[in-house]
Image (cartoon, grey):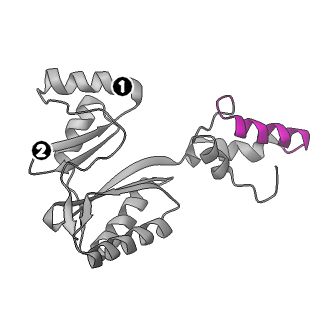
Amino acid sequence: MLEEDISIDKIFEDGGGIRDPKKNSKLAAVLAEAKTKSVPFSTFDKLLSTDNQIEPYIIEIKAPGGLFVIVESRAKHVANERQRVCSIAKKYGKQLSDLDAATNLGIEIGAKEVELSSSEDQRYHFHCEVHEIENLRQSLETIHHIPVINTQDIYSPKIFVPIHHDVRQTLDEMYDKIKTSLEYVDRIFDNVIINQ
């Protein structure tokens, strides 16, 4: 199990991203084996530190015609990754959505991340921990009088945008470029449907 080229990120990923050996059995097993082989804990200490933590984030890409693409990923430095995705999207004639107003509201109510899903409909996606959902919902509904549509962790398009097969190929090419350019991409969603 313990090899010189061990990937601590892979161990975290296999253990659900949890960095605490008390809650991540795979990490605990690696640390136990390291102890039996007299590997100093300081070797792992830096890897376990919060400075090395990989954070999940979501980026929304907007294109003409109502097309939205959501990239779900993880990175140590989110700003750098966000900039890289922005650069890739621009090469394909797309842009990242403007989140300023939604982000300010999200900060006020305690959301961890905010997405503007449709500027025409004023629909926002607020992200928080599961145990914070009810507080977030109450803040939106009682303080700001904003109705909450749902609280789920999946992305279901409300409107599908019909596209031609060649546009789908271009999107797939962009998705492949994003996946190969970033260290982690968990999921990519879009709201397209192929014209028949």
Q: Position of residue 84 (x, y in %)?
A: 39, 67
Q: Secondary structure at mark 2?
A: loop
Label number found at residue 10: none
- Nearest to the observer: residue 165 or residue 13: 165
Residue lying farthest to the right in this orientation: 37
Three-letter code, disc 2:
Gln
Amino acid type at image mark 1: Glu
Q: Main secondary structure of the magenta part?
A: helix
Q: Position of residue 119 (x, y in %)?
A: 12, 51
Q: Is residue 38 left or right of residue 104?
A: right
In the rendered image, the vertical position of residue 13 relative to residue 84, given as above or below: above
Q: Residue at x 20, y 33 (%)?
A: 149
- Tell me which residue sits at (62%, 38%) in the image: 19
Q: Residues within 10 Å of mark 1 (few under 14, many from 20)?
A: few
C-alpha distance separating marks 2 and 1: 22 Å
**In the current view of this chain or complex, which residue is farthest to the front?**
196
Asked if marks 2 and 1 touch (Cβ < 8 Å), the reply is no
26 horizontally vs 91: left or right: right
Write down the residue under mark 2: 122
Residue on which the image places disc 1: 132
Q: Which residues are magenta?
A: 22-39
- Image height of 164 relative to 86, above or below: below
**Residue occupying the point 21% across, 40% down:** 104
